[in-house]
Amino acid sequence: MELKVHSYESMGTYDGPGLRLVVFLQGCPFRCLYCANPDTIAFEGGTPSAAEDIVKMALNQKPFFGKRGGVTFSGGEPSAQAEALVPVVKELQANGINVCIDTNGGIWNSHVEELFSLADLVLLDVKQFNPEKHLALTGHANTRTLQTAAWLEAHEKPFWLRYVLVPGISDDEKDIRDLGDYFGNGKYKMIKRVEILPYHTLGVSKYGPLGMDYKLKDVPLNTPEQLVKAKSIFDEYFDCAVLN
Ligand code: SF4
C-alpha cells in the first residue's frame, strides 16, 4: 500500500526528541481554526509514495538521528493512513529507527490501535479540554482524543501532550486547570512531557490560495506575560511542562 505524503522535513527539531525526518501525510478529519498546514487537510492530493522510498530516505538520514532522533509521522493526521503506515513503522523499527506519531487522537480503528502500540512515542495534540470549545475550534468532539490518551496510559505507551495556546481560544485559566486536574498530579504516568506551543500565524498566507478563510485574523500572538502565566499554571499540575 502506498502512503499519501504531503511533504518531508529533514533535521526537524520540533516534532519529537532529537533530530528527525518528519513525514507530513496528507489528509485530516479535523478543521482547526489555527491549522498551520491547511494544505494537508484535504484527503485528495498528496504524493503517492511507496513504503520502500520512505524507508530508504530514513536510512540515508539515519547517521544524523543520533541516539534520540528518528522519524516522526505528522500531517495532516497520520492515523488516517494507519493501515498503510503500520508496515512502514515496522520496517523502520526493524532497521533500528525510532518512530514518533504526531496525532490529534481523533480516529480509532484496529489499524490505529496497532499503529499506536508500535510507536516508540506518541505526540498527542489536545486542542482544548473544554468539549464545546474543542468542537468550535476543530469541528470535532474531543471524546475520542481523551479515550486515546486513556488507551495510551493503560497500555503504558509513553506520550507527550501538546497544547497550542491561542489567546481567547485555548488560554482560559479554567480550561487549563481542568486539563491539569484530569491529566496531571501523577494521574497520567505515561505523559513524559507537556509541550505548550505558542500560537503562531506562519500558515496564514496558505489560506487565500486554497480558497479558505482564516478565521482567527483578529487573534493576537501571545504576550510574554501570557506565556509565563500559562507555563506556571501547567507547572502546578505537571513536572514536565515546557514552553516550546
Ligand atoms: S489536526 Fe493538525 S492538520 Fe488537522 S486541522 Fe488540526 S492543526 Fe490542521
Image (spheres, rainbow, N blue to C red):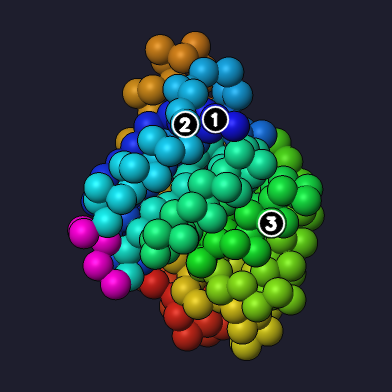
Q: Is residue 142 above or below residue 189?
A: above
**Count of number-bearing discs:** 3
What's the residue at 60%, 78% (across, down)?
190
Q: Which of the two marks, 3 or 2, is nearer to us in this view?
A: 2
* Mark 2 surroundings within 10 Å by alpha-carbon count, few (fewer than 14), some (14 through 19), many (20 or more): some
Can you identify the residue that label 2 sits on?
Answer: 50
Can you identify the residue that label 3 sits on?
Answer: 114
Horizontal and vertical percent position of residue 214: 48, 26
Mark 1 sits near ligand 1, with its Cβ under 8 Å away: no
Residue at mark 1 to residue at mark 2: CA–CA distance: 5 Å
Which sits earlier in the primary sequence, circle 3 or circle 1? 1
What's the residue at 66%, 34% (across, down)?
29
- Asked whether the residues under the numbered discs 3 and 1 touch, taking CB atoms below 8 Å apart as contact, a structural biologist would say no
Q: Amino acid at mark 1?
A: Glu
Highlighted range, magenta: 63-67
In this rendering, position of residue 164 left or right of residue 185: left
Q: Is residue 95 magenta?
A: no
